[in-house]
Amino acid sequence: MPDRSTWLRILLLLAALAAAAYALFTLLQRDAYLRGTDAYYYALQIDHWARTGHARIPDSAWIFPLLGLIQRAGLTTEAVLRGLCAASLFLGALAVAWGEPGASRFRRSVAALWFVLSPTMLFTAVEFPKMFLVAALLPLWDFTRDRRRFLVSAAAMILAIWAHRSSSVLLVAFSLGWWLDRRTGRESFLKSARIVLAVLAALAVLGFVLGDRSLFVDVNRFLPAATLSEPGLFSLISRDSLPVALKAELILAAVIFLFLLLQRAFRRDSKVPFRYAIPGLLAFLPWGSEDVFSVGERLALFLPLLTLLMWSRSRPNEAGERLSAGAAVLGGFLSLFAGTRLELSHPLTLDPDVAALARETASVADRGIPMLITHKTLAYYYKYAARAEAFPYEPEDHWNKERIWRLAYGIRPDEIWTYLSPECRDRLEFGRKDYLLVREDCWEDARRKLVREEDSDLYDRAWNPVWNPSKKRPAFLYPKHENDQDGEDEEFPALPPKGGTQ
């Protein structure tokens, strides 16, 4: 049982972590718009769930019902999302500090402070909220014999898989590492293997019982993304747009990770745990790609956390090893510099120009457009702010194109004028800065007439799938719509009517 001085140190550590989380939340609340590339996808899902009781876009993650219920209590969607960022950092730091029996209390406390101040962790919390929940839950994973801790570990694994599919890859690697840690004899070897297989089988059964295979990685989607190229860690570090602080931490984490791994490999008495080392090796596999934040790059974002866990849980408690009150107070003091921490981790320059998206949304929101085709960032913002229909892919073949309009980015009316029919020319609007509003059937007819050899610049802009959707909805998304509720998206269903196309 901890003595009074130990409880005081624990309370000081909690205060330091809470101060860091609260300072971050109050700073985020000052922003005019949400931070993060997919922020308005999350806002759309939460707001729709709060109003209707289900997500607008099929998604099995448990955070949308939870956050939707919180919004119903009277908070704004923005406050709920920013609160998620701050709270998940706080809870993740607690999970790091909780640790395992016998692990160094001093190291666990330092690791918790590092976690809550880490540029990579804060960047991930802002940019990938669902994936960051996996990072916050990962320190709780264990296959311990202690009944209470095992139940906590099992719950953490289930919630992680339910939050984001990346956790299934990490869990398999973690299980392999735990099995290697336990390999001290034939009997222990077989018992450990049975435990790992039983847990993985139970989680697989859970996915089928819930009737949602999307809880786990879709292999058909995963393998094409994981093409052999440079390691995800190197690909991530080479991104010019990423903050310097994040790159520096990734490099430092890689150096410490490799040192600890070599220590385990060459020292018999080393206690460096494989259960964190094996998942950490995923960052060094050749899974990078030209796409920003490929599979390998996303897995590389876990490296600082896994390195923290390797370091903090590689040594047993030693006599006199305690976190001093001064260290906790210093951590709390440093955490108050939330502004510097946020700008070093996720500056506003990384975000889309949401003010421009807001202006464009306001200009078309009151036109009663049944369906708007536009790039993904604007589509999610428009759906959220205007509560109207938008789609970030090429329209489905069974949709009525005369009922659909497109906001084409980077295309001027005078550039496409000669490719339009007289009827379509009458519908063009001049004076827009970056976007062209045109009916979808007119757009498709004009785009078909473009010839790369005659105007390669216009051709490339018109067919650019990022800014001007020209690819169909990914195949892995269609199964999610098989159970769409009757009457939902009646005019623009994902799947064609059973009796044929419209």
Image (cartoon, helix red, strand yellow):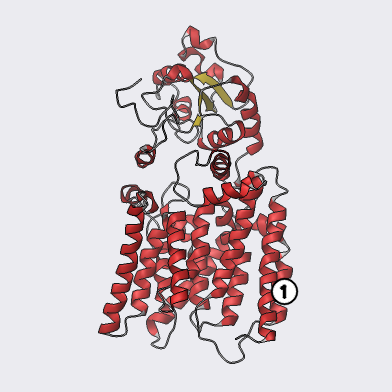
Judge whether 356 appears above or below 23 on screen.
above
Q: Is residue 223 left or right of residue 260?
A: left
Residue 480, given in percent of the width and then of the height, sits at 38, 41
* Quadrant of the rendering where the N terminus is positioned: bottom right
Q: Quadrant of residue 49?
A: top right
Q: Visible in this render: residue 34?
A: no
Residue beneath disc 1: 330
Task: Out of 323 and 79, give the one closest to the viewer.
Answer: 79
* Image spot of residue 15 (x, y percent): 70, 70
Q: Amino acid at mark 1?
A: Leu
- Which corner quadrant holds the C terminus? top left
Is 492 or 227 nearer to us in this picture?
492
x and y, in percent, of residue 138 in the image: 48, 66
Q: Quadrant of residue 194?
A: bottom left
From the viewer's perspective, is residue 277 above or below residue 204? below
Outermost residue, top direction? 422
| Residue at 35% from the left image edge and 40% from the top image edge | 479
Rendered residue at 36%/23% (across/down): 398
Position of 310 with respect to 212 (left or right) is right
Residue 30 in sight here? yes
Left or right: where does residue 5 sit relative to residue 290?
right
Judge by depth and name the residue closer to the eye, 150 or 244. Answer: 150
